[in-house]
Amino acid sequence: MSTLKINSLKAYRKAYQESIKDPEAFWSRQAETFVWKKKWKKTLDWDFQKPDVKWFIGGKLNITENCLDRHLAERGGETALIWEPNDPSQKFKTYTYQALYEAVCQCANALKANGVKKGDRICFYMPMVPELTIGILACARIGAIHSVVFAGFSATALADRIKDASCSMVICSDYNARGAKNIPVKAVVDEALKMGCKSVKTVLVHQNTGEKVRWKKSRDKWWHEELSRRRKTCKATAMDAEDVLFILYTSGSTGKPKGVVHTCGGYMVYTCFSFQNVFQYEQGDVYWCTADIGWITGHSYIVYGPLLAGATTIMSEGVPTYPDAGRFWHICEKHKVNQFYTAPTAIRALMAQGDHWPTHYDLSELKVLGTVGEPINEEAWHWYNEKIGKGKCPIVDTWWQTETGGIMIAGLGDISPIKPTYAGLPLPGIQACLVDAEGNEITGNDQEGLLCIKFPWPSMIRTTYGDHERCRNVYFSAFEDKYFTGDGARRDKDGLYRIIGRVDDVINVSGHRMGTAEVENAINEHPEVIESAVVGYPHEIKGQGIYAYVIVNAAVKDEDRFRKEVLKVVTREIGPIAKPDRIQLVSGLPKTRSGKIMRRILRKIASGDTKNLGDISTLLNPEVVEAVKKGALA
Ligand code: PRX
């Protein structure tokens, strides 16, 4: 049984209407296609003011029984997971559904033997190896909550996340093979655990490259030793539909990253439903999403969505340009990929390497191309369409967020209308709307506004871990009875949405979401910094680059040395992904009379638009604007 498969525009319109008229009946029908240990009593309860959203109330399930067990009879011998290593001369690995099931059960038994219980938080800090997928499913099997931290984050960032969720175990690899580099992973965990992570009792280490690591006997254990000889079956723990499945940290406009909480039932139903329809996945197809499991895209559309749908999903360890810029296309040819899902920043980077790379490979199996994470510019869209899709593959531009759990606005394969740079129509069940600054809904088409969602959907955020008030404040307090996305959008005359970008202090660098305040806090750690302000600016490859304006004290004589040190500090505090592209030393920052930094002006200067700064006469210090303009870096 599968969730509704929409195969025509008419069917989409019908499903959409049904989902709006009677959302409970619509989602109840989808949920019935899964294996439940106990059926739910009520489909939905919600109150956006608190917020309190519950789906499939009273229902009991285990998501891994739906990802694995239920497929065994019919397709136990079919490929669930293909792992493509960083080094193309190394053999790729495949796991059938049966093999993946056994590996997950073994790992679940190993976790139990190490004292892991339902509700415990387990942190993953791992490269893209199959053991990451196996490990998170093993957690889900026994009701432990996984918190995956992208392995590019620094020890400090990792420690913050471990402490916030009081994780009892960290699962990591020895090293991360990435392009020509071998990046230490275990060493970063060791360093993080020195930063007051008292809750961690065990570190489970997967041997990836096999190079030497430091060992703390009382704490560290090898993955292969702990898993060997464990039984290959493990009873799946009955989870309440609203029990937490995972926590995933993401950046906001203020403060430290917050732990977005997703729960079992609704997340399961929605990721499967959206996967099947957006990618128009058919049994036997090979699907590849190039994201990292450290981000939501990897959670929902490498692991859960595809496995729930019984698909063959590829995980790749390496980078798009190693050993050369043809790697993506080589992998597509090698595994006969039918659906390919990546980020605009990767498309732009590969486009810049020249048109000849894709021509060396057979891409004729491709049926659907997807993008995610940031707006796709027209030039990249056309390149993707012509050079990769050969004009015959629909491009599904999928708009969604860590908080939404699944794809919200996107084309459904070639079924719904597609327009370059437009994400398109909302999926069934998604009541998207635009509001003005006062919160009035903007009805009618051909309009621009702030993007909100006015009715719950199954995979939505339930809370921010350990701080429910923050969840209310960030997403549900801006506009009454609406979830506010933080994005601005345009709706064209046919109702298609185009995402313009964030309207808050969040920037999107190479599809990685970053809070400007977070980067400023890191820069301010440098002892010679007095104050800093960070904004995004248009960047040809990354979409947005990071522009930092910094006021320094008299100790700074050598600006180059200072800039290098700032990059080091940011790498230490957050990770290399947060390094500013430009650092301009300034004597002052434009401020309002109440002392707030006028980022609007700084954004304009950073983007090279120094002429239309608007009215600056009301500033506390209008004179600094000229100086900032003069020193602007291009
Ligand atoms: O600004 C939007 C942008 O990415 C933000 C969400 O980032 P994150 O939680 O890291 O999730 C990214 C992957 C789902 C959004 O608020 N964004 C995401 N997809 C698109 C997009 N902007 C434009 N077009 C998209 N397709």
Image: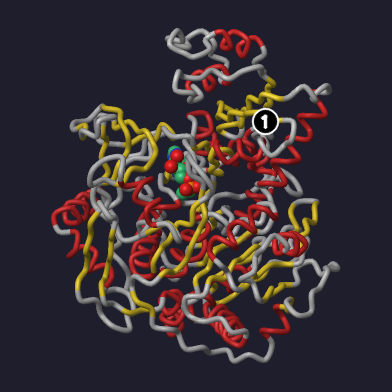
Is 473 placed left or right of 445 in the picture?
A: right
Q: Residue at x 30, y 44 (%)?
A: 477
Residue count near mark 1 (Cα–Cα under 10 Å), binned few <14, some 14–19, many ≥20: some
Mark 1 residue element: loop
In this picture the colour scheme is secondary structure
Q: Nearer the viewer, residue 415 or 461?
A: 461
The residue at which mark 1 appears reads as: 581
Quadrant of the rendering where the C terminus is positioned:
top right
Q: In which quadrant of the rendered view does residue 132 lie?
A: bottom right
Q: For the image shown, how many numbered marks are present on the structure?
A: 1
Q: Is residue 248 visible?
A: yes
Q: Position of residue 66 (x, y in %)?
A: 41, 76
Q: Position of residue 479 (x, y in %)?
A: 27, 40
Q: Is residue 369 visible?
A: no
Vertical relation: 406 (above or below) 355 = below
Q: Residue at x 44, y 22 (%)?
A: 594
Vertical relation: 52 (above or below) 498 = below
Q: Nearer the viewer, residue 1 or 447?
A: 447
Quadrant of the rendering where the N terminus is positioned:
bottom left
Q: Position of residue 215 (x, y in %)?
A: 81, 73
Is 351 placed left or right of 251 in the picture?
A: right
Q: Amino acid at mark 1?
A: Asp
Name, please, the residue furthest toward the left. Answer: 21
Q: Nearer the viewer, residue 379 or 166?
A: 166
Q: Residue at x 67, y 24 (%)?
A: 551
Name, please, the residue furthest toward the right. Answer: 212
Q: Position of residue 62 (x, y in %)?
A: 40, 78
Vertical relation: 252 (above or below) 404 = above
Indicate if the residue with disc 1 has its beta carbon within 8 Å of ligand 1.
no
